[in-house]
Image (cartoon, grey):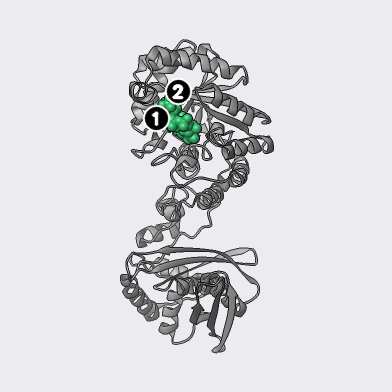
Amino acid sequence: MNEAMRTIRIFDTTLRDGEQAPGASLQPEQKIVLASKLAELGVDVMEPGFPVSSPGEFAAVQAISRELQQVEICGFARAVKGDIDAAVKATQDAARRRIHLFLSSSDIHLRHQLRMSRPEVVARAREMTAYAKQFSDVVEFTAMDASRTGIDDLIEMVEAVIEEGATIINLPDTVGYALPNEYGEMFRRVREGARGGNTVEYSAHCHNDLGLAVANSLAAIQNGASQIEVTVNGVGERTGNCALEELVMALSTRGDMLRAETGITAEKLYEVSRLVSGAMHFPIAYNKPVVGRNAFQHESGIHQDGLLKDRSTYEIMDPEKLGIPRSMIVLGKHSGRHALKDRLARYGVELVGDEMETLYNTFKETADRQKVVSDDQLLQMVSSTLGKPAQVYELIEAQVISGTGSSRVAAVTLRHLNDQTEATYSSVADGPVQAVISAISQGISSDITFGDLELHSLSSGEDAHAEAAVTVEKAGKIFRGTAVHQDIVMAAGLGYVAACNSALMSV
Ligand SMILES: CC(=O)SCCNC(=O)CCNC(=O)[C@H](O)C(C)(C)COP(=O)(O)OP(=O)(O)OC[C@H]1O[C@@H](n2cnc3c(N)ncnc32)[C@H](O)[C@@H]1OP(=O)(O)O
Ligand SMILES: CC(C)C(=O)C(=O)O
């Protein structure tokens, strides 16, 4: 018989440990917006900051405690009265709150950072836990650097804080050093070996220095942890923390083996990931699990063929269930005829026999010279194969006047391929890309609205090329267009026109 499913509590520390990543600092107003999105996502506990660390941090934790009554709020503190007082005060108005205090347990930290003896540290842990307990029934105690602590020393500290009323014991892998079997074993030994060890809840908090944060968190779950501390996109100190989206999807995808689930609404994962990335100005790696651009995109013909026959051949999760717009096929030099035919069919184009072979050969020659082939380029190839236009709009020219003043002036020329007319449009905006997009919009059907633009550099150096991916919306549906150009403004304009062509020609 299958083991019963356990529910794992998600403790989100994006706004505390996540924000400790160099360059990730957020303003209190940004924290408030992100906190409400995290609450919608369904996190169980939220650590919105470190109240004693600055007036802004205190204000953010206080505002979030007041506004988000549906989530348990955590006040973070060193084993110092002043820190606990600040955490208590900042979380005063939360509907449910906990005090989270931490103190190092490893010899390395005791000797080199705290410069305290073990008896002194254990006494401090006791005293501060008892102090925090006066203010909150729920007290989480973290033995910092637990994974590099001798097991007897760790058990001694855990027993002391349990006696003083700690209700949750967090055993972090502070420096991302542990291996999954060691980390899991530590939880088992503390749980079974500490006096009162079976009366408290256990939490894992893992860092990703060796790329093991998620694996270690799963090992902790398999050894009794019922709370996992995570951050969106895995942001955090150094190489970051256990990524919320990766842990959640590992549990949901491999629930058959892990027998544990969370209360996270998977459909919101992608949106929250993008919001955090935007607010922190931290781009998401293309190959990042779950939310990275390539997580559900395929360029190889054999994979594309399998996916078109049945997506389970090469995908273990459904991107649409994660709120990720599906665009699984990317055309490039590794693509085959099945993928080409599928893409053409989206535009109502069907080529057979020699025409298909001609297009395929042109496609491969072009693809050999560049990273990816955009839809716009493909449709141009179709036009030359058939000897007649296959797109609705073509961007003939785009010019922008930039300068030190506050506005940019753009002029674009569009050709309407059905009747071969050309027209020029102009616009003024704050930035050059905005000016070009706005000028193009004037010549495009009014039922298409601009959605989003992502610009990336595909290479570095003087001949660097920009890749633009643009989305537009028509009748509630999203369409995407991509373009590559040495001129960043042209790349954006061509990508926009490609997206509009997709919207107009899509069947
Ligand atoms: C693994 C983690 O993520 S731990 C959290 C790390 N996060 C942060 O540090 C972000 C916010 N920090 C800050 O704003 C500041 O460091 C503050 C306000 C907390 C402290 O600032 P300062 O008082 O100027 O101290 P500073 O940061 O230079 O040094 C840390 C001090 O805390 C002590 N300390 C470190 N951890 C603890 C702890 N858990 N309990 C008690 N004291 C501690 C250190 O030993 C050192 O003490 P010392 O001054 O006696 O040598
Ligand atoms: C203090 C704890 C929670 C921590 O952030 C760590 O050990 O990395």
Q: Residue 492: give x, y in percent of width and height.
A: 49, 70
> Few, some or many C-alpha atoms within 10 Å of disc 2 (few <14, some 14-19, many ≥20)?
many
SS label for mark 2: strand
Q: Residue at x 49, y 76 (%)?
A: 349
Amino acid on which disc 2 is placed = Leu
Whether residue 240 sits left or right of residue 97 in the image: it is left
Amino acid type of the residue that numbered disc 1 sits on in the rendered structure:
Asp
- Tell me which residue sits at (33%, 38%) in the image: 210
Q: CA distance from mark 1 to mark 2?
A: 13 Å
Where does residue 498 sit, x and y in percent of width and height?
Answer: 50, 73
Task: Name the residue beneath numbered marker 2.
Answer: 103
Q: Is residue 284 above or below residue 155?
A: below
Q: Look at the numbered disc 2 and say if its residue's Cβ is closer than 8 Å to ligand 1.
A: yes
Instruction: Name the disc covering residue 17, or none.
Output: none
Given contact means CB atoms under 8 Å apart, are the residues at marks 1 and 2 in contact? no
Identify residue for label 1. Answer: 173
Look at the picture and state if 442 lies above or below 283. Answer: below
Q: Where's ligand 2: which quadrant?
A: top left
Q: Between 268 and 172, which is closer to the camera in this rendering?
A: 172
Residue 31 placement: quadrant: top right
Q: Is residue 115 above or below residue 217?
A: above
| Label 1 vs label 2, nearer the camera | 2
Identify which residue, 19 or 80, lies in the foreground. 80
Figure quadrant of residue 363: bottom left
> Where is residue 233 shown, x and y percent of the image?
47, 45
Q: Nearer the viewer, residue 486 or 132?
A: 132
- What SS does tag 1 mark? loop
Which sits earlier in the primary sequence, circle 1 or circle 2?
2
> Is label 1's Cβ within 8 Å of ligand 2?
yes
For residue 221, say whether it is visible: no
